[in-house]
Amino acid sequence: MDGQFLINGQWLNHERERTDVKNPATGEVVGSVPNGTKSDVNDAVEAARKAFPEWSKRSVYERAALLEKLYAKMLEKKDELARLMTLEMGKPLAESEGEVEYAANFVKWFAEEGKRAYGRIIPSHDTNKRLHVIKQPVGVVAAITPWNFPAAMITRKLAPALVAGCTFVLKPPTATPLTALRLLELCQEVGIPDGVVNAVTGSGKDLGESLATHPHVDKITFTGSTEVGRTLMAQGAETIKAMSLELGGHAPILVFDDCDLDLAVAETIKSKFRNGGQTCVCGNRIYVSDSIYDAFVEKLGQETAKLKTGNGLDNDTKIGPMINKSGYDKVKKHVDDATSAGARIVTGGTGQTDEDQDVYYYEATVLADVTPQMLIMNEETFGPVAPVQRVSSDEEAVHYANQTPFGLASYVFTNNYARAFRAIENLDYGIVGWNDGVPSAAQAPFGGMKQSGVGREGGSEGLEAYLETKYVSIGGLDQ
Ligand SMILES: O=CCCC(=O)O
């Protein structure tokens, strides 16, 4: 697929140099996209700015109706989108299908929720006055999205922005732009007007800076690393950009001794190995109560050993390729560091690479006898490795869980509500899965504390993120 920019309803390439999009499972080129420049970003932002007055003045019912059509269209094209996603990103086809549904759910849910962007009337202190609050769209939104969820991380931003009345400029990921561009074609097909949705492909660093410093961009919404989030925040400071940032995680999984062991293992596997471990909310470190530690490690090892690594297009694949060499190198570094310091490989522990083709696989791995000093317990791995550390109390587990500058997702397994609530209330995390390894849902707020981000996506908070609050004080009523 030869991707192009989408600016004001036109697909263009401006004869820019192109970057190949490769299948990480095979190294084969599956498409290419033009490398956009600052002037392309400017054209896209100005198109969005021009489209804003008309789009924002439409009734929310009209905007929602178009999103309902987009939802239906995405489901109609589920197989095609899922295949494209697996080709450029590598995740198993069943997971890609799941992601298309997840992505479509954001569109459906925000089409409904947009109609509830209520203002309010505040009782006045003065009989001469009335105090009203109204909600209005933020304006032109620039979205910079990651490669690990090529569709859902777009619709989680696009759907609330559009239904709120904002217009949109997308900078899709360099590794996986094709699903994004197909999604925008679907926006056109269902009748979303020219200029409301625009896209420029190319280098994240250059285009990100152009967007974050552009005076006609009102808001930046970004999902990606904390490092890049920090840069965007600094670049946006000059124009005091509104920002929603969904950044890195280092999710702890706390397994208490009264838990349902089978459930804890099954949900840990979902949390840890979903998307091959390349998810910001993937469990990254596991703290298990002393008395069930051996049983948990044994069962986790047995179940993990069943996860087959391979090309995502093969039916039995559960773990696809790593997205690139640096992803693979980090996983290997974490495993090597842990084993050299005394960690035991329960299952997995090896990679398979073809450097000529730029193809990198790493087996689903469980490490036992892990200690707090090991690198893997202190950095996000973003790969299929589950390190397990023994702890002697719930308090100790919570203590280790909070020993990090990150605070996105955490997980706790226990059947005792009091132990659960004590842990939940003490965990410095934006999301807690209690006996649940996959808490994400379109209707629920997703986001992090500390250096894991600013703001929430999904849920009513995710709509609020695209609305300005305007307070109107009305006087002269006693005359
Ligand atoms: O990696 C980020 C998003 C994952 C999710 O929505 O569950």
Image (cartoon, helix red, strand yellow):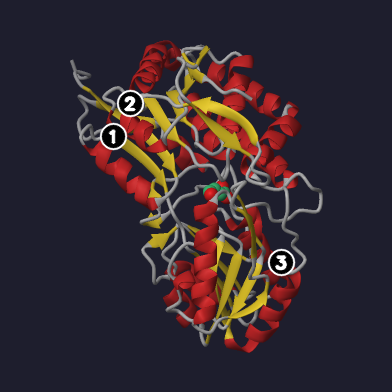
- Measured as percent of width and height from the top left, residue 172 is found at 49, 33
Q: Which mark is residue 214?
A: none
Q: What amino acid type should be assigned to the residue bearing mark 3?
A: Ala
- Measured as percent of width and height from the top left, residue 76 is found at 74, 26
Q: Please rate how many residues cluster around mark 1, counting C-alpha atoms within 10 Å: few if below 14, some from 14 to 19, many from 20.
A: many
Query: Which of the two discs, 1 and 2, labels the residue nearer the N terminus?
Result: 2
Q: Is residue 93 above or below residue 437?
A: above
Which residue is at 51% across, 76% downward?
338
Residue 106 left/right relative to 399: right
Q: To which residue does mark 2 refer?
A: 217
Of residues 194 and 343, which is closer to you in this image?
A: 343
Q: Are marks 1 and 2 in contact (CB under 8 Å)?
A: yes
Find the distance from the CA under tag 1 to the CA under tag 3.
Answer: 42 Å
- Measured as percent of width and height from the top left, residue 471 is found at 28, 29
Which residue is at 54% across, 42% downward?
147
Q: Is residue 111 above or below residue 412?
A: above
Q: Please rate how many residues cluster around mark 3, counting C-alpha atoms within 10 Å: few if below 14, some from 14 to 19, many from 20.
A: some
Query: Residue 143 occupies which quadrant of the picture?
Result: top left
Q: What amino acid type should be assigned to the residue bearing mark 2?
A: Val
Q: Please rate how many residues cluster around mark 2, counting C-alpha atoms within 10 Å: few if below 14, some from 14 to 19, many from 20.
A: many
| Ligand 1 under 8 Å from disc 2 Cβ | no
Image quadrant occupied by the C terminus: top left
Task: Decide if residue 271 is in sight here.
Answer: yes
Q: To which residue does mark 1 refer?
A: 241
Query: Residue 233 occupies which quadrant of the picture?
Result: top left
Q: To which residue does mark 3 refer?
A: 266
Furthest residue toward right: 315
Of residues 425 and 413, which is closer to you in this image?
A: 413
Q: Is residue 441 above or below residue 397?
A: above
Query: Which of the two discs, 1 and 3, labels the residue nearer the N terminus?
Result: 1
Secondary structure state at the residue bearing disc 3: helix
